[in-house]
Amino acid sequence: MSKFSLRLMAVGIFACAVPAFGQINDGFETYPAGNLPPQGGWIDFGGSQPITVSTVQAHSGTKSMRLSEGTDTQGGTTTGYGSDVYKNFLPAGGYTNLTHSAVQFSYWQYIDPGVDSVMFNYISTGRMPATFQTGLDLRADAPNQYTFGSSMLAVQDLGTPPAPTLAGNPRPLVFGRWAQHVVSVNLTANTYNYSYDGFQMVTAGQWDTTPGDGISIAGINFWNQLRNTNAINDFVYYDDFATVATAVPEPASIALLGFGALAAARRRRA
């Protein structure tokens, strides 16, 4: 067997591990301006404000997803509540350590300079809406609700009993321009890295803090809530969601390809 043929078989072996694109890949260009849900699998989670496709800001193209603060003030659980939207990565289930070795999820965020509420960005280990508030909670804390200044906070429920805990040092919030969030999850090792606006905030943190029920990443939930002391309805825009999930190669397929290549090479030598 020629070296070229062996190389082709090797490509077939490693092709099983080539990243496959997931379902949260959205630049909002295909939707008409106006209300977004339920287009593209984006679901309104009962907020006080609509989730819209906007042409006011865009990271690329001409459109983005817009979430609103609302005009309630001094928020708690029912007031100061704006837009609320969720979406799952896959039509059923999620990415688990049994099916995928790694998932990289990224998106761009634009915060209006007047925003003074908290922008919650949950990346959930479980499917929405039943199993949200697990995984990583990114809080864009514009009103200094948590006394760290106007900062991006990476928060997880840690400890016994679980309590919201900073997973990395806060970073100053970016207002008035686009900033990227990147979450890279190693499902095999149960670790993750997180960066905001090019700054690494978490390195090799524990991803799933309850791994006894499986290690996974399944959905997201974004909303605005708390404070809004100026009672002005300002906006947060999101664009260019991208997901790359690396599948675990099927052991049987790899073995068959590998043994086939070895057998062919042996026959050639014989």
Image: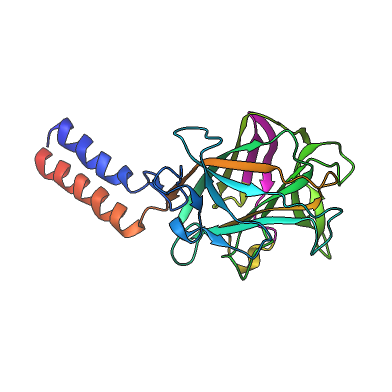
In the image shown, does 241 or 36 lie closer to the viewer? 36
- As drawn, which residue projects farthest toward the bottom? 130
Q: How many marks?
A: 0
Q: Which of 126 and 260 is in front in this view?
A: 126
> In the visual, does 108 lie left or right of 82?
left
Residue 236: horizontal and vertical position, in percent?
65, 42
In the rendered image, residue 23, in percent from the top left (x then y), is placed at: 43, 53
Residue 103 in the image: state x and y as whole percent: 51, 48
Q: Please give the range of residues in magenta.
A: 192-209
Does the magenta portion include 208? Answer: yes
Q: Is residue 151 rendered to the left or right of residue 47?
A: right
Please check the rendered image and state whether residue 42 is part of the magenta-colored stretch, yes or no.
no
Can you see residue 110?
Answer: yes
Instruction: Tell me the quarter of the picture where residue 250 sits.
Output: bottom left
**161 in relation to 40, above or below:** below
Q: Residue at x 43, y 51 (%)?
A: 22
Residue 245 vs 108, above or below: the answer is: below
Q: Main secondary structure of the magenta part?
A: strand
Question: Which residue occupies 33% across, 49% down?
Answer: 16
Q: Which colour scheme is used?
A: rainbow
Seen at 44% across and 33% down, the residue is 61
Q: In this view, does 161 lie above or below 7?
A: below
User: Considering the image in quadrants, where does the N terminus appear?
Assistant: top left
Residue 127 on image: x %, y %? 56, 65
Give me the residue at 64% from left, 67% from top: 212
**130 displayed left or right of 37:** right
**Quadrant position of the C terminus in the picture:** top left
Left or right: residue 209 versus residue 269 is right
Can residue 270 be seen here? no
Front residue (pair 106, 223): 223
Pick the residue in front: 223 or 112: 112
